[in-house]
């Protein structure tokens, strides 16, 4: 049996979701590439108008009615408009009124001269609100696991996706050299660059461990990651394709508290991302991550 890509996994599970008479909702679902070709070519999805910002409100209402909608936000920058109904009603409904609002939010990031709405991830928008589970799946198994957790429970689940991962068909195991000098904790699309950087640094005899983060909230440091961090010489770094003053610093604090080791963060530069110019504000590249490792380990 051929290995499925992340794109194919999302598409197949979405088709099964529709077959079970649940809803899939969003703007421009069946146009402009079917959201990176992650949606089945069928007409029973609910197209929401682009003329207003009430789409997430419709999705919340459908969730309250028990339809378990998948709400697709085709550009992550739209989170700033869609978040109001999600964080102020869906996330609070079960706690305040005893009425669950099971909603799965798919939000898609991308980078590279495509305008400020589409540029980079914005998963920090949802991280601080109780009642929301926050995932950043970059592999077929991670997406399936998050979907199954959503279907088994009654919570709001936010999936921070990235178009750069849709062709990926592999799971991403940790890299664990003996006596690591530094430990990387990458999130979202930075996971691929971090893994490549760690492998290439072997040429310089640098021992770099990598422990991928796909579950942002509720976050739990694995026993293996904790062991590598405690054994490390220089502690660790949380890498993200969001601005560092958000999820990255929150997780770095949690990891430092548990491990007692120094933690750093690396994400977007503190300037606007997504502008259509020659030099964009992009996530940490492989070479930038390697330079950070050199700076920390070999000052």
Image (cartoon, grey):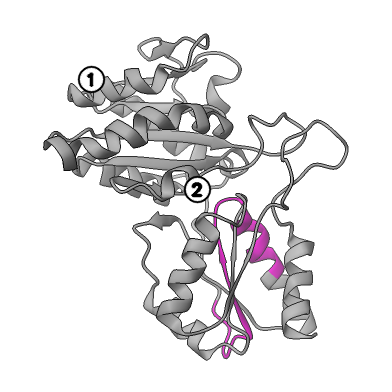
Of callouts 2 and 1, the N-terminal one:
1
Question: Does the magenta run of residues contain 194?
Answer: yes
Task: Report how far apart the C-alphas of labels 2 and 1 lie in the structure.
Answer: 31 Å
Within 10 angstroms of label 1, few (less than 14), some, or many (20 or more) residues? few
Residue 210 visible in the current orientation: yes
Residue named by callout 2: 124
Residue 261 image point, x, y percent: 52, 84
Residue 50 image point, x, y percent: 52, 12
Residue 22, quarter of picture: top left
Residue extending furthest right? 278
Residue named by callout 1: 21
Is disc 2 in contact with disc 1, using a CB cutoff of under 8 Å?
Answer: no
Q: Residue at x 72, y 29 (%)?
A: 115
When the figure is inspected, residue 89 is found, relative to residue 255, above or below; the finding is: above
Residue 4 image point, x, y percent: 47, 42
When the figure is inspected, residue 78 is found, relative to residue 142, above or below; the finding is: above
Q: Is residue 252 left or right of residue 15?
A: right
Q: Is residue 143 left or right of residue 261?
A: left
Number of the front mark, 2 or 1: 2
Q: Is residue 288 left or right of residue 110?
A: right
Residue 251 image point, x, y percent: 47, 64
Circle 1 SS class: loop
Q: Which of the labelled discs sits on residue 149, or is there none?
A: none
Residue 104 visible in the current orientation: no
Question: Does the magenta run of residues contain 171?
Answer: no
Q: Residue at x 41, y 18 (%)?
A: 55
When the figure is inspected, residue 203 is found, relative to residue 137, above or below; the finding is: below
Give the position of the C terminus as an image quadrant.
Answer: bottom right
Circle 2 SS class: helix
Q: Which residues are magenta?
A: 176-197
Residue extending furthest left? 98
Residue 65, quarter of picture: top left
């Amino acid at each position: 049996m051929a290995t499925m890509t992340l794109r194919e996994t999302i598409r197949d599970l979405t088709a099964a979701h529709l077959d079970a008479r649940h809803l899939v909702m969003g703007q421009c679902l069946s146009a402009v590439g079917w959201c990176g070709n992650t949606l089945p070519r069928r007409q029973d999805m609910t197209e929401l108008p682009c003329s207003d910002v009430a789409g997430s409100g419709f999705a919340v209402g459908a969730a309250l009615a028990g339809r378990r909608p998948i709400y697709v936000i085709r550009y992550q920058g739209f989170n700033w408009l869609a978040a109001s109904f999600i964080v102020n009603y869906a996330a609070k409904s079960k706690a305040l009124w005893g009425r669950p609002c099971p909603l799965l939010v798919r939000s898609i990031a991308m980078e590279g001269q495509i305008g400020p709405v589409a540029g980079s991830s914005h998963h920090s928008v949802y991280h601080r609100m109780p009642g929301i589970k926050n995932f950043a799946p970059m592999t077929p198994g991670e997406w399936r696991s998050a979907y199954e957790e959503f279907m088994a429970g009654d919570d709001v689940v936010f999936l921070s996706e990235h178009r750069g991962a849709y062709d990926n068909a592999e799971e991403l195991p940790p890299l664990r050299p003996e006596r690591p000098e530094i430990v990387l904790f990458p999130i979202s699309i930075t996971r691929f660059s971090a893994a490549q950087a760690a492998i290439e640094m072997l040429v310089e005899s640098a021992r770099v461990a990598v422990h991928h983060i796909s579950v942002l909230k509720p976050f739990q440091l694995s026993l293996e990651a904790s062991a590598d961090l405690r054994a490390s010489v220089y502690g660790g770094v949380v890498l993200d394709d969001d601005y560092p003053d958000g999820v990255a610093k929150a997780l770095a604090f949690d990891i430092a508290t548990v491990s007692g080791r120094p933690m750093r963060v690396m994400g977007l530069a503190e300037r606007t991302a997504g502008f259509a110019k020659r030099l964009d504000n992009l996530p940490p590249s492989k070479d930038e991550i390697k330079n950070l490792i050199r700076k920390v380990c070999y000052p």
